[in-house]
Image (cartoon, grey):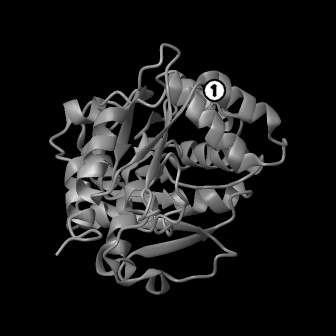
Amino acid sequence: MRVAIAGGSSPTLGASIVCALLATHGRYVPIVLSREIDGRSSNELGPAYENVETRHVDYHSHESLVAALRDVDVVLSVLLVPGPEWVTTQVNLLRAAEVAGCRRFAPSEFALTSWAQTRVDILEAKNEVWRAVQASVDKGHIDAARFPCGMFMNYLGIGCPDESKRAEALAGFQEGPFLIHLDDHDSPWVEVPVRSDGTFPELTMTDIRDVGQFIVAALDLEEPWAGRDLGMAGDTLSFETLIALCQRHVERTIDIRRLTEQELQARLTSMPSHEFIARMECQLSLACAQDGSVVSPTLNQLCPVQPTTVEQYLELFWGSGPGKS
């Protein structure tokens, strides 16, 4: 079964899914879709991609996409396209998958729930794409699902003290810290968006590497995806538990910085409209304070995947932290 991964050359989700597909030893065959302007061959993407076919496509050309998908059974997107063209690119990929006769489709939805995305300006585009996907499912054109996974656990790897483990901890992740700042080894701190009653919310975290395993498990499902949210969770825990685990493994006192919804809203109001990333992070914090950071673990219940927990992750990558032998 051929599985095309749009954006499959990415070092994070692309690599996770490609590696998981390769681990099925031919049961699923990954095909990387890459923009022609990328210009890299699969050999240049690293040893894991040595025998992976790369098909160069123009996401604004229906003919190019249909030709690339003619012999493909499943299309998975992990595209990260900033700006308004993101919706166009995703819908173009969907329409081509329909015409090419692909059986299943998954848009790039590896993040929060649809409710949380309505609270974040830049992520609302994901819901626009999903409405197009659902319409296609309803008409019987394709089977589809989206795969929310919560916050990447790999944020906890930023600042990993063991240089030999750092690349593995990040799994290609290159973002800066968000909420959890363990990279400040002298004075680590966690920013907690508290609920309206002052209590700490929960959040779902998933290791990037486990996403690929969950996707393979979803491909194995005989029942239709049926336009569902097939959520996955490496771990769902409260901020109290998260902070306690970080403190135990980092062996530093964690400074807890509480922020109320009112304080977050004031911060958001003061931000210039062009500061997209800062606004997104603030809106994500607000969604978290309203319990929008928890993903229902549907795939965990349907599939025999044993994902990495936060405690296991911290033990692996912070077990030899500052001051430890």
Instruction: State the image quarter where residue 294 is shown.
Output: top left
Q: Position of residue 240 (x, y in %)?
A: 33, 33
Q: Position of residue 288 (x, y in %)?
A: 51, 29
Q: How many numbered marks have been drawn onto this rendered protein structure?
A: 1
**Residue assigned mark 1:** 118
Q: Position of residue 298 (x, y in %)?
A: 29, 29
Q: Residue furthest top?
A: 197
Instruction: State the image quarter where residue 151 is shown.
Output: top left
Left or right of 132, for residue 170: left
The answer to whether one can see residue 71 in this image is no
- Rendered residue at 62%/58% (across/down): 65
Q: Quadrant of the N terminus?
A: bottom left
Q: Is residue 292 above or below residue 34?
A: above
Q: Position of residue 195 (x, y in %)?
A: 49, 20
Left or right of 148, for residue 126: right
- Rendered residue at 62%/43% (across/down): 281
- Rendered residue at 40%/27% (across/down): 226
Left or right of 41, for residue 85: right
- Please state which amino acid type lies under the numbered disc 1: Thr
Asked whether 274 or 129 is in front, the reply is: 274
